[in-house]
Structure formats: structure tokens, C-alpha cells
Amino acid sequence: MQLDKYVEVWLNCCIAVILLNVFFILSTRWHYYTTAGCTVMMILFHLFLLATFVWINIEIFSNYQLIADFISYEQSFMLKRVLIGCGNHIYCVLVNNNTAVVNQGLR
């Protein structure tokens, strides 16, 4: 039962890496078309880059818990990790991209 939680963390990390690669490949061609398209690709690329970093850290911590048996039972395991993995970096992306867009003179 407990291994299922760790598989979910691993799957979320894999999905973040796949989406990072997809938006990286798309962003190499998208900047030729419009400024808005380039800005959207920049925001999505940075979003999934930070999501990948956060999910890798969550995976490392979860593996530490699994190997060291740090906590025998934790309530709302996935909820805490999903809030960290999907929530924290959205704020960072919005703040950084607004600053980058203003500094580059795109607005």
C-alpha cells in the first residue's frame, strides 16, 4: 500500500520532465512567429522547469523516507506533496516572468 504513494510521486516527476522536454522543443521553433507566442512558451517552459526541480526534490525526500523509515505513517501524504509540487513554483514563475517581460521591454 505504501509503495503506491511513492509511485505517484515518481509518476508526477516523470510527467513534469516530459512536459519540460515538450515545451523546450516547442519553444525552439515558436519564437519565430509572434511575441505573444514566445512569451507563452517562456512562461510554460519556466513553469515546468521549476516543477521538475520541485518534483525531483520531493522524490529525493520521499526516497529518503522510504529508505530510512523516517516516518512510519503520514496522513495526507500525496496532498502535501501535490501542494508543494504544483503550487509553490506557479507564484515564482508569475513573478519572474512579469519582471522579465517588463525588463525586456515586451510590454
Image (cartoon, helix red, strand yellow):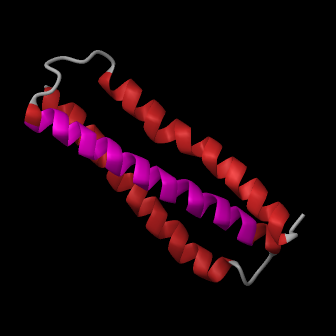
Res 45 → quadrant: bottom right
- Residue 27 drawn in magenta: no
Q: Residue at x 34, y 28 (%)?
A: 78
Q: Quadrant of the N terminus?
A: top left
- The count of marks equals 0
Say above or below: 1 vs 12.
above
Residue 31 drawn above or below residue 7? below
Report the residue at 10% width, 34% height from top.
68
Residue at point 17% right, 39% down?
64
Q: Is residue 7 left or right of residue 69?
A: right
Q: Which residues are magenta?
A: 38-67
Front residue of 19/65: it is 65
Q: Is residue 98 visible?
A: yes
Query: Residue 63: percent from the left, percent from the top?
Result: 18, 41
Q: Is residue 31 above or below residue 59?
A: below
Decide: is 6 above or below 71. below
The image position of residue 75, as x and y in percent, is 29, 15
> Where does the image place residue 27, in percent across and percent down from the top left?
61, 74
Residue 97 appears left or right of 44: right
**Quarter holding the C terminus?**
bottom right
Task: Please name the predominant secondary structure of the magenta segment in the image.
Answer: helix
Seen in the image, is 85 located left or right of residue 26?
A: left
Q: Nearer the viewer, residue 23 or 75?
A: 75
* Identity of the residue drawn at 84% across and 62% down: 102
Q: Position of residue 87 (x, y in %)?
A: 54, 36
